[in-house]
Amino acid sequence: MADAKERKILVAVDDGLESMYALSWSLHNLVSQTSNDTIILIYAKPPRTVYTSPDGYLFSPDMLASIDKCRNDLASSIIEKAKKICREQGDKEVKVEVIIESGDPRDVICQAADKIHADVLVMGSHGYGLIKRAFLGSVSNHCAQNVKCPVLIVKKPKSSSSATGTK
């Protein structure tokens, strides 16, 4: 019997429950125990906003360094939470890789999916309504329209507090 194809499953994570549910669902429903799958966690750090005043910048270099530290700490925390889910819910053999980039999540995720030649992109759905989605835009919708690989958008059931993806 031939070896199973190695698949690159790119999972976008953020600080929302929806993305962690999508990761958990992927581990239970996409990753095969007989495969050579790699879960690639991607987190897009929002770009740092610099506000200015008439006399120059509002933030001192120390304040900007502090802001960057908080952004990096948040990224580390989210990735550690996602890796813990992979360890606890995934097959012990599943490989996990991490990508952290700064920028608009729509661009960061689409560029990474194309660059690594992902076999599938998995994203959680925040379930924004029509109005909120019109103002904020939908990262998952943008990615579904712009990446070359299939996109799986996982919606967290409203009635379930479980992140297992199973009943």
Image (tube, rainbow, N blue to C red):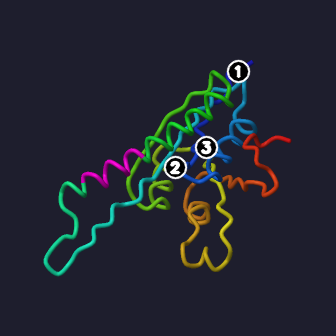
Badge 1 is on which residue?
A: 2
Q: Is residue 108 above or below residue 25?
A: below
> How many residues crowd around disc 3 within 10 Å: few (fewer than 14), some, or many (20 or more)?
some
Q: Which residue is mark 2?
A: 113
Residue 96: horizontal and vertical position, in percent? 54, 31
- Pinpoint residue 149: horizontal percent, then vertical percent: 60, 51
Q: Is residue 139 above or below residue 75?
A: below
Q: CA distance from mark 1 to mark 2?
A: 27 Å
Q: Nearer the viewer, residue 112 or 80?
A: 80
Quarter of the image for the C terminus: give it. Answer: top right
Give the magenta part as a residue range.
Answer: 65-73
Which residue, as the protein is rendered here, is positioned at the far right? Answer: 167
Q: Which residue is mark 3?
A: 119
Residue at x 54%, y 73% (from the top left corner): 136
Q: Is residue 149 left or right of residue 112?
A: right
Q: Nearer the viewer, residue 158 or 143?
A: 158
Q: CA distance from mark 1 to mark 3?
A: 19 Å
Q: Could you tell me how far apart the alpha carbons at marks 2 and 3 are, in whole angstroms?
A: 8 Å
Horizontal and vertical percent for residue 120?
A: 62, 46
Q: Is residue 2 magenta?
A: no
Query: Of the residues under marks 2 and 3, which one precedes in the sequence?
Result: 2
Q: Position of residue 72 (x, y in %)?
A: 37, 46
